[in-house]
Amino acid sequence: MRPETADYLAKAREDIVNARDWLDAVHRGSEAARVAYLAAFHAAQALIFERTGKIAKTHRGVRSAFAQLTKDDARFDQDLRQLLGRGYQRKEIADYGVGPQPSMSEIEAREMIDTAVRFIDCIASMI
């Protein structure tokens, strides 16, 4: 494993700890979901870098490169394949939403965190 890949995976795992802290200590589902998305984002960057030696710099670029690298991989079920897209939508709401906005329940946020953990574990097993 390349050092940069290990750094991305370490960041992903750190983000999971932070997502759980947002949920357990502050009870902020939207913020927890946002950080869970970032965990998945960093894990996807790890896979992309390990396989291509390139860094995808944008959220769209990471989603696209990840989809291409895993399109025929049976280890990624529908939930894992959709995580980056769904998570990015939650990130946008948490970052830019004003006024009445849809919030994420603690149950939904915990499901997103659990899916992100499965996502990270799956990627780590591939590297």
Image (cartoon, rainbow, N blue to C red):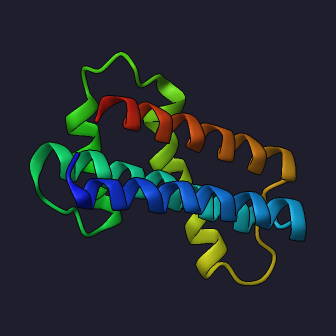
Evaluate whether residue 51 shows in this view: yes
Left or right, 38 with respect to 28, comes to: left
Which residue is outermost to the left? 53
Question: Image point 51% across, 62% down: which residue?
Answer: 38
Evaluate whether residue 88 shows in this view: no
Left or right, 16 with respect to 8, comes to: right
Q: In the depicted view, which residue is nearer to us: 113 or 101?
A: 113
Q: Position of residue 47 (x, y in %)?
A: 28, 45
Question: Image point 58% across, 41% down: which residue?
Answer: 117
Q: Position of residue 36 (x, y in %)?
A: 60, 56
Q: Position of residue 69 (x, y in %)?
A: 21, 36
Left or right, 106 with respect to 109, comes to: right
Left or right, 65 with respect to 104, comes to: left
Q: In the depicted view, which residue is nearer to us: 89 or 43?
A: 43
Q: Quadrant of residue 16?
A: bottom right
Q: Quadrant of residue 5?
A: bottom left
Question: Image point 67% across, 47% down: which residue?
Answer: 113
Q: Position of residue 119 (x, y in %)?
A: 49, 37
Q: In the depicted view, which residue is nearer to us: 121 or 114?
A: 121
Q: In the depicted view, which residue is nearer to us: 117 or 5?
A: 5
- Number of labels in the image equals 0
Q: Height in image: 126 above or below 7?
A: above
Which residue is outermost to the top? 74
Question: Image point 63% across, 70% down: which residue?
Answer: 93
Quick one: quadrant of the C terminus? top left
Quick one: quadrant of the N terminus? top left
